[in-house]
Amino acid sequence: MPATPEGRTPGSDRLAQLPVHTADVAGFIGEALAAGSGLLHLAPCWVPRSFLRPGRRLRLHPDDLYPFGVARGGIDERWLSSTVTADNDGRQPDEGLSYVIAAGQRVTLQEAIAAGGADLLGAGLWQAYGRWPVFAKLFDNAGPIPHHMHQSDAQVAALGRVGKPEAYYFPPQYNAQPNDFPYTFFGLNPSTRPSDVRDCLARWHEGDNGILGLSPAYRLEVGTGWLVDPRILHAPGSLCTFEPQWASDVFAMFQSVLDGQPIPWSLLVKDMPPEHHDDLDFIVAALDWEKNVDPTFVARHFLRPRIASASPDHVDRWVVYGRIDGQQCFTARELTIAPGGQATVVEPGCHGLLCTQGAGRVNGQPLAAPTMIRFGQLTRDEYFVGAPAATAGVHYENHSDVEPLVVLRYYGPEADPGAPEAGEA
């Protein structure tokens, strides 16, 4: 990890001190899976955003919020089981990539999955994608994010990229305070016309282009979530958010000013063909108009937790579910183990795992939600669970006699046929 502008590397910097494993990655990962009872231990992966203000709820030490300097922006995202790099100007070469930690060495999860293949992801997922096609993040901002949309596969295929469906869940453990604006704008008012959006884009360089005036805002509720298709405008609010999504970082900002800070035109057109960077009609047409002005938007996209399984010792809830254009892109569950309890959960497939509360063990490995993390410090709150261990059943133990053990897990496409559909009663 690089030093801060003052020349001090924050935290213990344990991650940077570990050598990168380069020889026989497949053998290294096989040994790591055997030692970890089918789990890969992951280091925290921090990502800054230059156009946003950190919300200070990611449990990162306040002295470490700007590890790459103020110009790069503060840390407001933690990426989970990620195999995709962050699309940030001036980024570090491995920015956004999760690292597997084993035997005092490290390798990126991207390299681990490439080497492990079907033995790690399962035959179906590996044959269909040849990679881990999703990832998740915690994003945490003091205020809202600019009104933006994410492109579909078809829109960015010529650029060698993939689209980005996503979903939100607002975990209580990361939302003791709502911060400045716990509301999210979604879509457009049903009476909005394409020419209204075009007029907003034409006013980009005059200051605030007023696009939020065309969109309804919804108050966010801790412990619930939303399903968000590509090509739908949204301006996420200030709750700390667990976000499963497709493994992509494409976006188009449609708002010209946020909290008094100008948004450059380049962030609107960065994932659009260069010949259309000044074509307002093309940019407006990038939106899925029917989905944006849908008067039944809430019924189709709002998610309340649904119980997947329960016993005296545990309750497992779906917190992200539903289909986007007919595809189950991802799902997520929240598992709660009672104090002193234990449970074995047969999972639908490989998955990323984050402990949000409590301490115990998972398949015999230490599991604990940290109170405070230094940049570069290793934790024991995050794992990637390989397909064989997942489908055999993952065993959890809560070692506290007073506090629940809470774990979020997210899964890949078409992994969970028992999951409910969005909009079901």
Image (tube, rainbow, N blue to C red):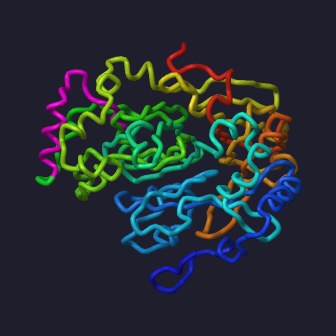
Residue extending farthest top: 425
In this image, 330 relative to 233: left or right? right
* Image point (57%, 41%), residue name: 172
The question of residue 15 being in magenta is answered with no
Q: Residue at x 46, y 62 (%)?
A: 48
Residue 155 is situated, as x and y percent measured from the top left of the image, at: 38, 39
Residue at 81% over, 55% down = 366
- Position of the N terminus, as image quadrant, is bottom right
Q: Image quadrant of residue 391?
A: top right
Judge whether residue 382 can be spotted in this image: no
Work out which quarter of the rendered image holds the C terminus and state it: top right
When the figure is inspected, residue 194 is found, relative to residue 280, above or below; the finding is above
Q: Position of residue 213 (x, y in %)?
A: 20, 36
Q: Nearer the viewer, residue 230 or 239?
A: 230
Write the start and end of the magenta stretch as one range.
Answer: 184-204
Residue 328 falls left or right of residue 381: left
Q: Is residue 16 visible?
A: yes
Q: Is residue 208 left or right of residue 400?
A: left
- The correct choice, above or below, for 90 with respect to 227 in the image is below
Residue 113 in the image: x percent, y percent? 70, 52
Front-lying residue, 199 or 214: 199
Q: Residue furthest bottom?
A: 7
The image quarter containing residue 8 is bottom right
**What is the tally of numbered marks visible in this picture?**
0
Q: Residue at point 16% right, 37% down?
A: 198
Residue 366 shown left or right of residue 230 in the figure: right
**Magenta run includes residue 189:** yes
Is 292 located above or below residue 257 in the figure?
A: above
